[in-house]
Image (spheres, rainbow, N blue to C red):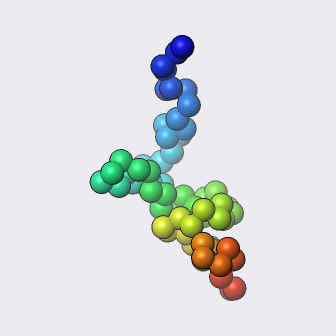
């Protein structure tokens, strides 16, 4: 079995201003990245500019 996962990660395609690493090593996307993507993924992201509420499952009314 191959243990080379280098082709799996898309982090190399990200701009350094699109994310930062948490102390635990997780990738945290910035508001800039979410706006560039253009839609809400509805995952309850920390910097969601679309106002998604994970508890209700709804986007904030604009």
What residue sits 48% from the left and 61% below the top?
30
Which residue shows up at 48% across the image and 67% down it? 46
Q: As rendered, which of 29 and 15 lies closer to the eye?
A: 29
Residue 57 sits in quarter: bottom right
Quick one: which residue is furthest to the bottom in this view?
Answer: 62
The answer to whether any part of residue 31 appears in the image is no
9 to the left or right of 52: left
Q: Residue 41 placed where, x, y %?
A: 65, 60
At x 44% / y 56%, what residue is drawn?
Answer: 28
Query: Does 10 sit left or right of 19 as displayed?
Result: right
Q: Can residue 38 be spotted in the picture? A: yes
Can you say whether 19 is above or below 46 in the image?
A: above
- Quarter of the rendering occupied by the N terminus: top right
Q: Residue at (52%, 35%) from the top-left corner? A: 9
**Residue 38 on image: x %, y %:** 67, 61
- 3 up-or-down from 21: above or below: above
- How many marks overall? 0
**What x and y, as percent, mark residue 49?**
57, 72
Outermost residue toward the top?
1
Location of the C terminus by quadrant is bottom right
Residue 21, horizontal then vertical, whole percent: 37, 51
């Amino acid at each position: 079995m191959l243990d080379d996962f280098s082709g799996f990660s898309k982090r190399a395609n990200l701009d350094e201003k699109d994310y930062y690493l948490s102390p635990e090593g997780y990738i945290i996307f910035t508001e800039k990245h979410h706006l560039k993507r253009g839609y809400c993924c509805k995952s309850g992201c920390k910097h969601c500019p679309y106002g998604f509420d994970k508890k209700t499952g709804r986007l904030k009314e604009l």
